[in-house]
Image (tube, rainbow, N blue to C red):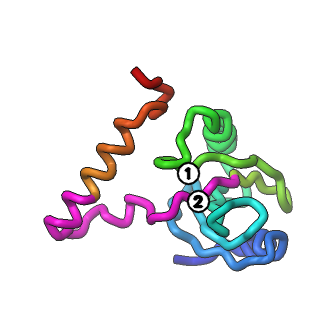
Amino acid sequence: MLQPAWLSNIADFYGSAFRVLWQDEELVLCRGRTDERSRSGTILIKAAATDRPDPATLARLAHYYGLRDCLGDEWAARPIDLVQRKNRSLLILKDPGGEPLTGWIGRPMETRQFLRSGIAIAGAVNRPGFAGGSEP
């Protein structure tokens, strides 16, 4: 995956190299090391993939940031901050670990891995607080 040119400027700010985890025409998701923003030592950055993003893309980043109090650290990449760096909006997220599910699409999966993943996903969406729900 190509590394966006602006990512090196962000890496200079955080003092770390970032790796692209996922990218489409609209957004890019990157992981990098930093000790000041996350207990795990890594953060995620989600940003527009182009220099001139559609206003709807920026609105989606702001909307996701607005959901920060509804998302659980155990199962979501919870927003920490929405910042402007080098004329670019960056959504800074806590890194829960793992890899994006998009990497699983279109390839076979071993039965054991499929079942473990399915159980973990079902457990995550069944937790209190998922999608704004509350504990019974």
Q: What amino acid is found at the position of numbered circle 2 in the picture?
A: Asp
- Left or right: 14 as drawn, with respect to 117: right
Q: Earlier in the sequence, mark 1 or mark 2?
A: 1
Residue, far left = 111
| Pointers 1 and 2 in contact (C-beta within 8 Å) | yes
| 83 to 37, vertically: above or below | above
Span highlighted in magenta in the image: 92-116
Residue 129 locus on image (x, y percent) = 48, 31
Q: What amino acid is found at the position of numbered circle 1 in the picture?
A: Ala
Q: Residue at x 65, y 44 (%)?
A: 61
| 88 to 42, vertically: above or below | above
Look at the numbered disc 2 and give the secondary structure of its residue.
loop
Relative depth, front residue between 3 and 112: 112
Q: Tell whether position 120 is magenta.
A: no
Residue 95 marker: 2
Relative depth, front residue between 90 and 120: 120
Name the residue carrying label 1: 77
Query: How many C-alpha atoms fall within 10 Å of the one at disc 2: few (<14), some, or many (≥20)?
Result: many
Q: Residue at x 40, y 36 (%)?
A: 127
Q: Check the picture and name the quadrant holding the C terminus.
A: top left
Q: Residue at x 23, y 66 (%)?
A: 113
Q: Residue at x 28, y 58 (%)?
A: 117
Q: Tell whether position 101 is magenta.
A: yes
